[in-house]
Amino acid sequence: MAEQGVYLRDVNSLCELNNHLQFAAEAMANIEDNVSGYINGVKDVLEHQLSILRERLEKAQEQLSRAEDALSRCEASQHYDDESGTYIPSCSWEEREVRAARQEVERCQRQYDEGKRIVDECEREISDYNTIGGLAIPPGGHHLILNMVQSQTVRATEQLREYIGDANEVLKQDVGGNGNSVEQITNENIQVDDI
């Protein structure tokens, strides 16, 4: 079996590759910081909006409670008038207020429920993005990028710097040959484009 090797044409290209790997890792770290900041900002805004919807719902429920109390008091004060054949006072205004207040509570409840659903969905997505992962669950984007920046890129650039150092050592070596000899040493792997 023939030995396989690496044919290196330019050590500087390895140095550039190393620089590009480090730059890409830094750029990804900056992008991840921006993404994390953005999604957490969106979550904060959504939670604030949800608290406003909760306050509206609570006010609507309080208004309904007051309207129902007013209707109860009105109905408690009613008496039947034999001449007109009706109850006095009529309490129709209080009944309209209760109906309007119930409709407002229902509307506010729907808005709050929808807002809560959106906030919960947002929190689930952020949780998935921030998950560390495990055996059966891949890491979320946050930890995937952190691993790339803090571990993978560090190892790759360290290894690449080792290769660069080794290549520079090889290039410093005297490959032998007699300077007075007319025998020409050729590299069979060199191509016309390399000259």
Image (cartoon, rainbow, N blue to C red):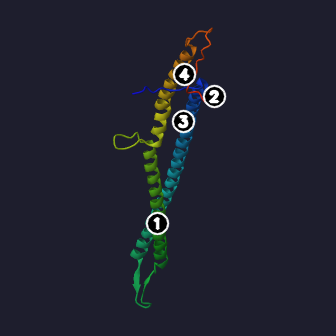
State how far apart marks 4 and 2 are (Cα).
Answer: 20 Å
Residue tagged by mark 3?
29
Q: Amino acid at mark 3?
A: Ala
Q: Can see residue 139?
A: yes
Q: CA distance from mark 3 to mark 2?
A: 37 Å
Name which quarter of the figure residue 65 lies in: bottom left
Earlier-in-chain disc, 3 versus 2: 3
Dot in front, 4 or 3: 4
Quarter containing the C terminus:
top right
- Where 83 falls versus 17 (above or below)? below
Give residue 181's position: percent from left, percent from top.
61, 10
Q: Amino acid at mark 1?
A: Val
* Callout 1–callout 2 Cβ contact below 8 Å: no
Label disc, if present, on residue 55 of the rendered structure? none
Name the element at disc 2.
Answer: helix
Residue at 46% from the left image edge and 30% from the top image edge? 151
Distance between the Cα atoms at labels 4 and 1? 71 Å
Residue position for label 2: 194
Residue extending farthest to the left is 135
- Other-residue count near label 2 (Cα within 10 Å), few / some / many at <14 / 14–19 / ≥20: few
* Residue at screen point 57% across, 35% down: 24
Q: Quadrant of the N terminus?
A: top left
**Distance of label 4 from label 3 (alpha carbons):** 25 Å
Label 1 CA crowd tier, 10 Å (few <14, some 14–19, many 20+): many
Q: Earlier in the sequence, mark 1 or mark 2?
A: 1
Residue 105's label in the rendered image is: 1
Helix, strand or loop for disc 1: helix
